[in-house]
Amino acid sequence: MEDKLRQKARELLSSGEVQVVIGYGWNRRKTRTTPVFITRPEDTDRLVFNPLCVNNLSVYLTRKYPDIKAMGRPAVVAKGCDIKNIAVMVSEGQLKREDVYIIGVTCGGVVYRQELWQGELKPGIMPVKCHNCDVRNPHIADVVIGEKTDFAPPEEPTGMVFDKIAEIDGMTPAERFAFWNEHFSRCIKCYACRQVCSLCYCERCITDKNMPQWIESSAHPRGNFAWNLIRAMHLTGRCTFCGECERACPVNIPLNIINQKMSLVVKDAFGYCAGYDPDEHPPMIVFSENDKEDFIK
Amino acid sequence: MSNIYLPHIVKIEDIYRETPDVRSFRLVFQDKKVRESFEFRTGQFGLYSAFGYGESTFCISSPSTRKGYIQCTFRATGRVTNALAQLNVGDTIGFRGPYGNWFPVDEWKGKNIVFIAGGIGLPPVRSVIWTCLDRREDYRDITIVYGARTVEDLVYKNELEHWDERDDVYLVQTVDPGGENADWKGRVGFVPTVLEETAPKPENTVCVVCGPPIMIKFTLQALENLGFSDEDVYTTLENKMKCGVGKCGRCNVGDVYICKEGPVYTAREVKRMYNDF
Amino acid sequence: MDKRLLKRERLDRLIDGVTRGGGLFVAPRLDARRVVYGPVTAADEMEFDYIVPGNSFKEFFFPRTEPVARFSFHKQGTELEEVRPEPVETVIFGSRPCDAASCASLRSVFTWDFVDEYYTEREDAAVVMTVACTQGDESCFCTTVGVAPDGRDGSDILLRETEGGDFTAEAVTEKGASFMERYKDAFEATVEGREKEVFQPEILDGVDLERIAQWLKDKEHYSSPLWPEVARKCIGCGACTFSCPTCHCFDLVDEGTFFEGERRKNWDSCQFDYFTLHASGHNPRDTQYKRWRNRFMCKFHIYPGKFSTKGCVGCGRCIRVCPVRLDITEVMEEISKVP
């Protein structure tokens, strides 16, 4: 599969159809994969694809990277979950579908607990998103590399995240507040969650605006709560549960619980799931007269 | 404990509206001991607090020869400067300083001095001008070349008049082409161009340059063309600052900390800096 | 002072002694599936099986956020009140030699002409008990930058694990010796048990610190195309800077209401895009690779050149925590290779 990937990349670069291929490459010790930017056909041998390729490379397509935009038309190696983010970006007008060449790769799941990786993909080291994934065969792509898989996700979403959501749903508001306060108190305001998310593409994030300072930048409980809350609200209906924010968080805040809960709420209220149709706008950013209102009491 | 982050309280004694968005403050320390003992050298800067909004860095634009008060001039651009611009006479703000290095005016005794400034770059230069004028006999010829985009943007208009009238100072004022009005009697042209026309001689002369980066760049070029050595040309740089004391890691240009090893540099030192502008 | 033995079961005595006096006993503990330095009240909260805790203990000398002044607005003017650090005796147990070596670096910045007493008072009130490393992983590279896995720099007491789960203890400084004296019922004179072997991370022979220092000194290389090449994938998240034991950048912000507020000193990161943004809109470091370049320069040029201390102690946290696995040792090797 990697050979086919490299060959396709070589073709794209040689023909000039794209000027840069954003993909995964090995680190020096071949123990982790890392994003690579290939501009020359002879360098395409650096491209790899294996279950260690967790990164969501769509983040490099956002407006925050003018130097990458200046490299020319990109091709991006994308798994189903990454493509979902590109679909949302297209629906929000951040990029035109024809401005990026999507090299879709069929994915059998990725590894999150990478220190436990011993060459074999076991369910225990895969994140919850992979067990429930319905885009293991990329749904939007210019080319699909890899064998088609007939994996079907379970009817009801399962996994630690969903169990936790059910548990929190059963809590009183005071208990919920205490739960989240405890987690957010660990926040160090490093903004890794924001930087790694391709849908957090605002060039001047609300927390960086200081006239007035809407969200305090200090890492005290009040400031942390404000930041995490505003991020959750701004992503509602748009987040595709790619899980990158929780993976990037250096203090292990369970952001996936928030992401997934918001997705479930939006699905219930508007029947919308982010990332499948690049022509459909996320419900929180558009207003149409026949929007459902029955949940407004 | 001497808390390096704790500002002195200063009261605004006077506000002058230089231009619609530029203010000059005259500030007096509220603590008597500080008021009587405060000293600084021309070229140093301070961090001025608008409590509740933050701190901003400006030079001390009053001369080091005058005691009992300090002055600063700033343009209302961002959060803190806009908050400061809304204040009234009698309000209190904070001041931390003096920080940084200074213009070596004592080494310039017996020399000619050419002051070149553009727009909002005049305040730091003004401090040096008055420090020298307060000891006029120590220096030989003093030339001031000052320009702004339009007549309205000129700062210290009343002092410019005074310098124009003095016969021991040669003042050349200019506005950018298109910035003049019907009453304008000065020159029209960019500062570096007018400087070359004024053609000060490099012998026994030092220059003090301050202004927007693009103006500094072309002025240094013009001075080189006129034969000035880059060790005789002084400028003052600015960068975003927060602590002012070399700890917050923000103001460095390469490996040079503007707040500690600056803001005053010779043109030679500027050339040696890393391209981190 | 000769080596003493600190038995595992005596740790509670130390903890009690320190915390009873109102002090803080900081040790590696489990928090949300990570081993981190944090305050403990009993030895059973402590973790002993770790390579290096996820955070560095700088947060106990240089808090993530702390008030430095409080102000309130009155008709007569503004009232300003300073907020003192009020340090308590802090024992950092289970520090690693790399973390301990970073103390000198931070102190050199915080005492450069102006003394930041928020840092010095806290560090002066702390006793650093370092445990030499008996395990490591591929991200450790202390030996490459001149730190030993059983190094003594910055430690007050150096502990070594024994096969039996206890520690031999050696006083490195006066402060450490007097601490061991004070708790001599915990530090026994008879040393028994074999010390475990110290883990030696491989020295990366592709890294030439001399060459790197020389290369960085030349200002032409600041504009080298190597920087965008190596740092293009950086997403500017700041996780490396916040986990790094020698990173010291901070912000001073005012927070409050119309009536009163406080000025806070918060951690900041040179990797954030607005770090060097001027109010005029000009940003000297406007693309991510420029910001990453500044970080590298700070560690390998500014710290050693200006402060004569180590900018990088080889703890490897930045490598472990980076979401895109931008490995600083790979960049060191790239620069060492440049002809």
Image (tube, helix red, strand yellow):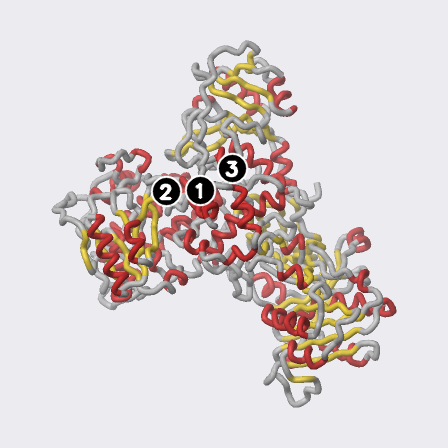
Residue with the mark numbered 1 = C329
Q: Residue furthest front?
A: C339
Indicate which disc residue C145 carries.
3
Relative to B99, C335 lies left or right = left
Of residue B181 and residue A206, the one placed in the foreground of this image is: B181
Q: Chain of mark 1?
A: C
Relative to B1, B247 lies left or right = left
Contact check, label 3 and label 1, Cβ < 8 Å: no
Residue placed at 83% from the left, 76% from the top?
B168
Contact check, label 1 and label 2, Cβ < 8 Å: yes
Can you give x and y, in whole percent of width and height, for residue A209 in the image? 48, 59
Residue placed at 30% from the left, 55% from the top?
A42
In this view of the protein, can residue B122 be seen by the observer? yes
Residue density around tag 2, few if under 14, some if 14–19, many if 20 or more, within 10 Å: few
Q: Is residue B198 above or below residue B258?
A: below
Q: Is residue A294 above or below residue C24?
A: below
Name the N-terminal-most of marks 3 and 1.
3
Q: Quadrant of the rendered structure where residue C112 is?
A: top right
Residue with the mark numbered 2 = A28
